[in-house]
Image (cartoon, rainbow, N blue to C red):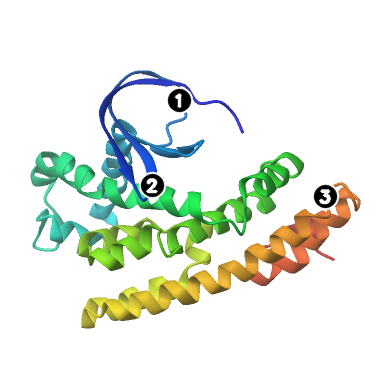
Amino acid sequence: MKSIFFLAEKLREDVIEGCRVIVLGREKAKELSSPFAMLQEGTIIIRRDPMRFFFWDQIQEVRSSSKASLHHALDRYGIINNGQLDQEAFKHRLDTIVDGEIPIFIYHEVGEMLQQTLDSETLKKIISTFPDSAIEYVSRAVKDVLADTHPEGMVSFIIREQRDASLGFYVGFLAGLRKVLSPEIINAFGHYLKSGDWNSIEQARVACRDKNLRLAEKICDIACLIGIEEGDQVRLRFYNEVLKPLGISVPELED
């Protein structure tokens, strides 16, 4: 809910799924906050510079990580050698990876634009009432998963185009609450590695989406009580009906 400032060169502009998309290149000035994909008033903005840093940081961890998903993705880009990250090859192919994966992040934002179950106004109400809380973080994560699993979202795009490397990156980048909310896709990826069966990923997408839709509806129902019930009562509802079933502990709200 804060303004973000940056000044960058424009590389190109497209229209995807009826949505204006602007891809930005070298940044001349920016603040510390650097989200690399945003949806602003119906326009998708992709910041290539911060995306390069994101991939660099994430891929560097492969050296000490046993994540089969990331190894799978990087192997498709030819930078895994004898089971290890080839650092020199990675340096030379970083831009190839970033440019190759920009489309999946565009489709996350397409899914964000199209999914309406947990709308932006409801999320803003939650954030303003319970800032920096488990309630905010879970609500944000559910909204992200719904965007990814939307029929026109990131995971659907990956499946439709059978983007092998992108699938590995998607699963490898799942972390924190998004990982908690997406076990169906993580488990299906293990099956995919053995069988190459894209149908198993599609089934997992649908199951994951259905589960998170039900969770989003519950979040929206409770958010409607903000300003009607006492804040502590609403917070307790969130804990008992949303957080606790997910295994998220909030000591001050436990009996």
Q: Are marks 2 and 1 in contact (CB under 8 Å)?
A: no
Spot occupied by residue 77 in the image (x, y as percentages of width and height): 13, 55
Does residue 247 appear in the picture of this structure?
Answer: no
> What residue would you read off at disc 2?
18
Q: Amino acid at mark 2?
A: Gly
**Label 3: how many Cα within 10 Å (few below 14, some 14–19, many 20+):** some
Q: Is residue 237 left or right of residue 104?
A: right
> What residue would you read off at disc 3?
226
Give the label on residue 32, or none: 1
**Label 1: how many Cα within 10 Å (few below 14, some 14–19, many 20+):** few
Of marks 3 and 1, the one in the foreground: 3
Q: Is residue 167 left or right of residue 120?
A: left
Spot occupied by residue 3 in the image (x, y as percentages of width and height): 55, 25
- Above/below status of 97 relative to 80: above
Find numbered disc 3 in the image and state the secondary structure of the residue it sits on: loop
Mark 3 and mark 2: Cα distance apart in space:
35 Å
Task: Identify the residue at horizontal 25%, vertical 80% (top origin).
Answer: 197
First of labels 2, 1 by sequence position: 2
